[in-house]
């Protein structure tokens, strides 16, 4: 049972998280914490002129499942729109909590976490990296729109 949850692929992803660290001048930043286990994700984002992720960094202190989510996001996030991040977040949440289909598009790699569905205590730590990424990107987009309107 636990071997299914922490597969070799999940553990490999967790050990090789891309884009670790913080950006020096992000347009948006967000932090999410899983209260049950204390997992934490802080994400920094900058957007290009089209509102797509141009640079991204993440400081994630989480279990292997949260680290795996962060690795998948870190591999796929450059060039993503805010809407793509929000859709992936919503799809991952639905997959885990209500048996929805796996995320599609650039974040389809999150399907590897489908086994987490059967472990509700692990849902929050699995979700926080993507929740933080979507929130940081939304914040960056809102700030650039406000700056453009001024």
Image (cartoon, rainbow, N blue to C red):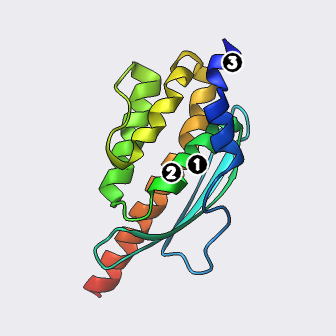
- Counting residues from the start of the chain, the first of labels 3 and 1 encountered is 3
User: Residue 20 appears at what percent x and percent y?
Assistant: 66, 61
Residue under label 1, please give it: 70
Quadrant including the N terminus: top right
Query: Which quarter of the picture shows residue 123?
Result: top right
The answer for how far apart the CA atoms under marks 3 and 1 are is: 20 Å
Q: Residues within 10 Å of mark 3 (few under 14, many from 20)?
A: few
Numbered-mark total: 3
Height in image: 91 above or below 50? above
Height in image: 59 above or below 8? below
Residue under label 3, please give it: 3
Residue at screen point 32% across, 45% down:
105
**Which secondary structure lies at badge 2?**
helix
Height in image: 83 above or below 24? above
The answer for how far apart the CA atoms under marks 1 and 2 are is: 5 Å
- Counting residues from the start of the chain, the first of labels 2 and 3 encountered is 3
Residue at screen point 61% across, 74% down:
23
User: Residue 5 appears at what percent x and percent y?
Assistant: 63, 22
**Which secondary structure lies at badge 3?**
helix
Q: Residues within 10 Å of mark 2 (few under 14, many from 20)?
A: many
Residue under label 2, please give it: 73
User: Residue 13 appears at what percent x and percent y?
Assistant: 63, 43
User: Residue 92 appears at what percent x and percent y?
Assistant: 43, 35
């Amino acid at each position: 049972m636990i071997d299914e949850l922490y597969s070799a692929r999940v553990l490999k992803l967790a050990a090789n998280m891309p884009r670790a660290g913080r950006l020096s001048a992000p347009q948006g930043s967000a932090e999410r914490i899983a209260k049950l286990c204390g997992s934490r994700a802080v994400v920094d984002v900058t957007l290009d002129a089209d509102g797509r992720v141009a640079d991204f960094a993440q400081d994630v202190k989480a279990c292997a499942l949260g680290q795996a989510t962060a690795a998948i996001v870190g591999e796929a996030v450059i060039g993503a729109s805010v809407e793509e991040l929000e859709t992936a977040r919503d799809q991952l949440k639905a997959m885990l909590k209500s048996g929805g289909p796996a995320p599609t598009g650039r974040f389809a790699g999150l399907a590897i976490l489908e086994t987490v569905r059967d472990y509700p205590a692990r849902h929050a730590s699995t979700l926080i990296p993507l929740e933080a990424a979507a929130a940081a990107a939304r914040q960056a987009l809102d700030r650039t729109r406000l700056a453009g309107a001024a």
